[in-house]
Amino acid sequence: MRTDEVMQVLLRDYPHGVSFTPTALRLLRLKVSVKDSQIEDLKALMFQQKDGLWFFREMIADDKTQAALQRQATAWLNEYGLFSVEQLFVSFCHNLRHIDTFEDLAAFLKTLGFAVVTWRRGGSYCFQPSISLDNWRVEQARKIVELLEAAGGTKALSEIQELMPHLTVEALEGIRKHFLPEVFSADIGGLLCWRNAKTVHLPEDFAEKLTAVIDSLVALGQKVSVVNVDFALNLTYGVRFREVYGLPDKGAFMRLCAERYQGTNSCFPKTNESHEVTPSDLSSSIKRTRSSNSKFRDLGIPIGAELVFTKDTQVTCTVLNDTNQVEYKGKPWAISALANSLLNSNSANGFSYFSYEGETLWGRRLRLSQEVDPVPGQIENIPLPVARRSGEGDIIGLAGELLCPATWRAFKSSGTDPRVARWVRRIEEGESVEAIAHETSLMVSTVKEYLMNHRRYLLVCEKNGIMPETVVDV
């Protein structure tokens, strides 16, 4: 039998996964004639889960769901450069077969041509491999700093999550700890917030009195530690200093003191926190998933074609050769160099910021490499798996902002899920999130995300005057 004929037999007779163990192969060969070389060809079209079973894409989802999932993943990559696989899992888990954890989804995404890497903290990331994952995380860190600055230095973590729906709490925490040592977590009025230590309003004479405290400790031969500095400032100001001024994080407190100290003693201990270490599979993951479609000729873009800058459609350039050279205002540029110049950046990927025939070059690259063949002209009409709001108009978020469709779908998916409704009741009856996570084989953070989105759905419905859909407990 031809390989494609064997594939059809496996799809028909083994919809719950295929095993290629010696015993399973002997049983398989009782049904079909398959050569050892064909087994390797079949595996190249499949992916393997932790339990050893192999799956074709068609076993996981139909074409419409696959296209919707790829469209959401591509949209996040185009907008942010990366996203937490767990966030995509929350939105699509009910529409995928044999995908029970976000690790399963990560393996599936790799077969679709996406670059995915798992970190010790922060879960799994899917990212554009054109630049390093750390560079993309730095961009997220900059976004967090901008959000904090716009809010006066302090913002509720829940609000940050709503504005960055592509990342889990763990991913946000990993970015904060790794790239933003000046940002710390604090409980303010019962609300978990992130705060920039540089924006904390301190007494006008703080630098002067702090310097006197430090110099006195040094003169007395005492260690300049959090405990000693904190105690001395408490006595100096007659209040519990760190509590009154909202500086519970020891590292942030000592960094702030080191910055404000005006003396000459080199007495502050190193305050660098232990950072995440890039796992060894980062480079190998990129090698496995990097596509060769990185030149204009691979994307079917001819010399002389006009490319449009996505941030300003009035800005265009012309393709000069079949690799990556374009002409802009009479001068030749590499496309990424031009994007960096226009954006005043140093890490932009030109494929993400220029489009051809209404499609970003990165999106075109993914579409061609994934080899998904939806009906021409109908890709935009493929419905997303999570139902949209039945009413008309925009959805207003809890902070008064317009919710993007992806965020609303995530809220609604959890808000109308009978399983999550049962979890809510169990939590109300005193059961722990950890117990539910253990029972369902989900991460604690995933269960918390479901519960949080369930609550957000009800609150957003109330804010927008929407009647929440009835949850049927089956």
Image: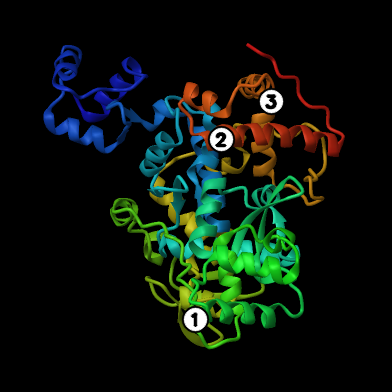
Residue depth check, mark 2 versus mark 1: number of the one nearer the observer: 2
Percent of width and height locating residue 404: 70, 47
Percent of width and height locating residue 377: 57, 44
What residue is shown with label 2?
90
- Residue farthest to the right? 465
Residue at (70% x, 58% y) in the render: 243
Q: Secondary structure at mark 3?
A: loop
- Contact? badges 2 and 1 (CB < 8 Å): no
Hey, what amino acid is under mark 1? Glu
What residue is shown with label 3?
416
Q: Secondary structure at mark 2?
A: helix
Mark linked to residue 48: none
What residue is shown with label 1?
327
Q: Secondary structure at mark 1?
A: strand
Dot 2 or dot 1: first in sequence order is: 2
In this picture, residue 182 sits left or right of residue 404: left
Q: Nearer the viewer, residue 404 or 148?
A: 148
Quarter of the figure with the C terminus:
top right
Hey, what amino acid is under mark 2? Val
Residue 405 vertical position relative to residue 230 in the rendered view, above or below: above
Res 290 → quadrant: bottom left
- Residue farthest to the front? 220
Residue depth check, mark 1 versus mark 3: number of the one nearer the observer: 3
